[in-house]
Amino acid sequence: MKKVLITGALGQIGSELVSRLRKDLGIDNVIATDIRKLDDNFICDEGIFEKLDVTDYNSFLKLAKDNKVDTIVHLAALLSATAEKNPKFAWDLNMTGLMNALEIAKELKTKFFAPSSIAAYGPDAQPDNTPQDTVMNPTTMYGVTKVAGELLENYYNRKYNVDSRSVRFPGLISYKVEPGGGTTDYAVDIYYQALLTGKYECYIDKGTKMDMMYMDDAIDAIVKLMNADEKRLVHRNSFNITAMSFAPEEIFESIKKYIPNFKMEYKVDPVRQKIAESWPNSIDDSCARKEWDFNPKFDLDSMTKEMLEKLEQKLKAEGKI
Ligand code: VAH
C-alpha cells in the first residue's frame, strides 16, 4: 500500500484507519472520502478529503484514477441494526458500493480491502469456536450482504486477478468515533455511560456472548493483512479474526474493577437481541494467525483500562464530565 483511497472515512473504522495511514504513508497518500463532509473534523481538515457517494461509479472511478491510488479500502456500508430497518436500501448501498469498488480495482489494477463480519454466519453454524470454513446462512440483510460480498471479492480475484483481501470483524470497540447502527454497539455505549451517568441500561441480554476487539487491534489487522505476502494466503475473503468473546455481565464486571459503584440493568431490544443470537458465541481465527500472523494485543481488562482512560480525557475535553 503506497497511495490509498478510503470510503466511509468518517465512520468508526474509517476515522481511525485514515489517521493511521496518514502517519504510515504520508498525509498526501491517503484520499479520505465519505458521503458527508463535517466541519471542524480532523478527517476532513487535516489531509485530503473528498465527498463521495460510492453508488456513483463515474465519480468514484475519477477520484481513484486522478489520484493514481494503488489500493482501495472500501468501508462505506450500513451496519446490522440499521440494515434490518431498511433491508432494500441496505442491499442497494452495500452491494452497489462494493461492486463499484471492485470494478474500479479491476480497471485500475489496485489492491482491495473491504470488511466482512461475524454477521456472515447464521444460527446453523457451530456456535462455539465457529470454523473458518462452514455453512454461511445469515438471517440478517447485513449478513446476506457480507456473505455476498465475500463471494464477489473472491470472484474478482479468481476471474480478474484483483488482489482482494478481507476480514470478518467482530464487534469493534473504540473511543474516537462512536459506531452507528450496529448490534455490538452496546459494548461501546456501556463505557460512555459508566463515565457519564454511572449506570447502563443494556439492550443485549445477560449471557449473550459475542466476539469483540479493540480498535487498535482491528487497524493493525487491516495493515498487516494488506502488507502480507500474497503467496501465504490460502483464504482471502474472508479471514475470521477475534480478540475476545464476552457477554454483557462480563464487560460490566470489568468496568466495575475501575468504577466500583457502576450499575447495570437490562432492557432487551428484541430486534438486536435476535440478531445477536444468530451470530456465533466465539469464532476460530487460527487461519489468520497462521497465514498472516494475526496477533491481537488487547484482552477485556486491558481494553477496559485503555477505554476508560482515553474516554475520560475525551469527555473532559468536550466538557461533558
Ligand atoms: C454490527 N458492529 O454490530 C457491527 C459488526 C459484528 C458486528 O459487524 O453490525
Image (cartoon, grey):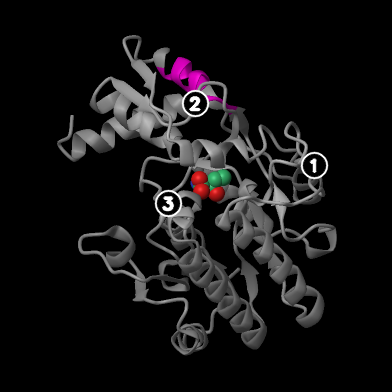
Splitting the image into 4 quarters, where does residue 213 fall? Answer: top right
* Cα–Cα gap, marks 3 and 2: 24 Å
Q: Which mark is residue 205?
A: 2
Look at mark 1 in the image and give the residue it sits on: 131
Looking at marks 3 and 2 on the same chain, the residue that comes earlier in the sequence is marked by 3
Element at badge 3? Answer: helix
Q: Is mark 1 within 8 Å of ligand 1?
A: no
- The stretch drawn in magenta includes residue 278: no
State left or right for residue 225 relative to residue 255: right
Q: Residue 61: give x, y in percent of width and height.
A: 51, 86
Q: Residue 115: give x, y in percent of width and height.
A: 60, 58
CA neighbours of label 2 inside 10 A, class few (<14), some (14 to 19), many (20+): many
Question: What is the span of residues highlighted in magenta in the rendered image?
Answer: 246-255
Q: Which of labels 2 and 1 is toward the front?
A: 2
Q: Which mark is residue 12?
A: 3
Q: Residue furthest top?
A: 260
CA neighbours of label 1 inside 10 A, class few (<14), some (14 to 19), many (20+): some
Q: Residue furthest left?
A: 319
Q: Report the predominant secondary structure element of the magenta stretch.
A: helix
